[in-house]
Image: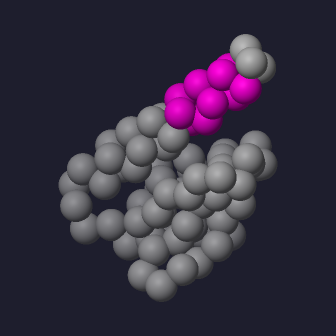
Amino acid sequence: MRYSSEKEINKLVRRLVISGWEFWHGGRHGRLRAPTGQSTISVPCTPSDHRAVRNFRSEVRRLSHELLNRAKNNLAG
């Protein structure tokens, strides 16, 4: 499946989907839901901004860290 016209974004989304994230098309952008089902992020399907890859990668990283911190806090009590 092709998630984005930008090959770097496409590769990253493919890896996330394989690792348990859910992808669906929603309007002009695709959407990714984290494996926990709590958080979603937009996937630029046809990005025109030269910073789109960097911004998307940062958003994924930020959400991943947030989910990891939530999991640690839940285990700690």
| The N terminus - image quarter | bottom right
Q: Position of residue 18 (x, y in %)?
A: 76, 49
Residue 40 quadrant: bottom right
Q: Residue furthest bottom?
A: 27
Q: Residue furthest top?
A: 76
The answer to whether residue 73 of the structure is visible from this angle is yes
Front-most of 72 and 29?
72
Front-most of 46 and 26?
26
Front-most of 32 and 52?
32
> Quick check: is 47 in the magenta stretch?
no
Left or right placement of residue 56 versus residue 20 in this view? left
Residue at the (22%, 55%) spot, across then down? 50
Front-most of 38 and 30?
38
Callout count? 0
Residue at the (50%, 57%) spot, across then down? 41
Decide: is 34 above or below 31. Answer: above
Q: Position of residue 9 (x, y in %)?
A: 47, 53
In magenta, the rendered stretch is: 64-74
Decide: is 8 above or below 1. Answer: above
Residue at the (33%, 66%) spot, across then down? 47
Residue at the (74%, 18%) spot, across then down? 77
Left or right placement of residue 36 versus residue 45 in this view? right
The answer to whether residue 21 of the structure is visible from this angle is no
